[in-house]
Image: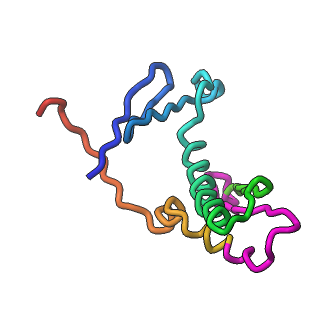
Amino acid sequence: MSTMVITSGGGKKVNAEYRGFTIETDQSERNGGEGSAPEPFMLFLASIGTCAGIYVYSFCQERGIPTDNIRILQKHEKRPEGKGIGKITIEIEVPADFPEKYRPVLIKSANLCAVKKHIQNAPEFDVVTTVAGE
């Protein structure tokens, strides 16, 4: 079992320590924070696009295809009732000289994203309290 340690950074800041990294979050000024770091939901959304990016860029790098002019645009549509995100579209923008035969494979590569797979097959959540030192 892996453990991520979540601590308060003061005010609306909350930090996550995991595998030697500290991931800082804050709330926007509108939500009572200082806006000094991304909000947790922003990191959640970014994790989807950056995960897809790892697979897309790795695919290209393994084949010697330059990645300088490849961008991934992630678009979010709200649910019709207005609460939450109803659809996420990942658009892989390639230059005109990108090999046509690899375009469908880029889509397959992006779909290998572990974050996306975990959303589609959601883990069970268990929230408990414990007493320190016991």
Residue 122 shows up from this direction: yes
Q: In which quarter of the image is the C terminus?
A: top left
Magenta span has 23? no
The outermost residue toward the front is 64
Q: Residue at x 71, y 57 (%)?
A: 77
Q: Residue at x 49, y 26 (%)?
A: 13
Magenta span has 88? yes
First to last magenta residue range: 79-105
* Relative vertical location of residue 97 with respect to residue 10 in this rendering, above or below: below
* Camera-nearest residue between 103 and 129: 103
Residue 87 shows up from this direction: no
* Relative vertical location of residue 133 with respect to residue 97 in this rendering, above or below: above
The outermost residue toward the right is 96
Residue 17, picture quadrant = top left
* Camera-nearest residue between 103 and 32: 103
For this view, does 104 lie left or right of residue 35? right
* Relative vertical location of residue 118 with respect to residue 31 in this rendering, above or below: below
* Camera-nearest residue between 109 and 90: 109
Q: Residue at x 76, y 80 (%)?
A: 101
Instruction: Please provide percent x and percent y for residue 88.
Output: 66, 60
For this view, does 101 lie left or right of residue 26? right
Instruction: Please provide percent x and percent y for residue 66.
Output: 74, 59
Q: Which residue is drawn at 43% across and 63% down?
A: 122
Residue 42, picture quadrant = top right
Instruction: Please provide percent x and percent y for residue 64.
Output: 69, 65
**Numbered label tally:** 0
The outermost residue toward the bottom is 101
* Camera-nearest residue between 56 and 113: 56
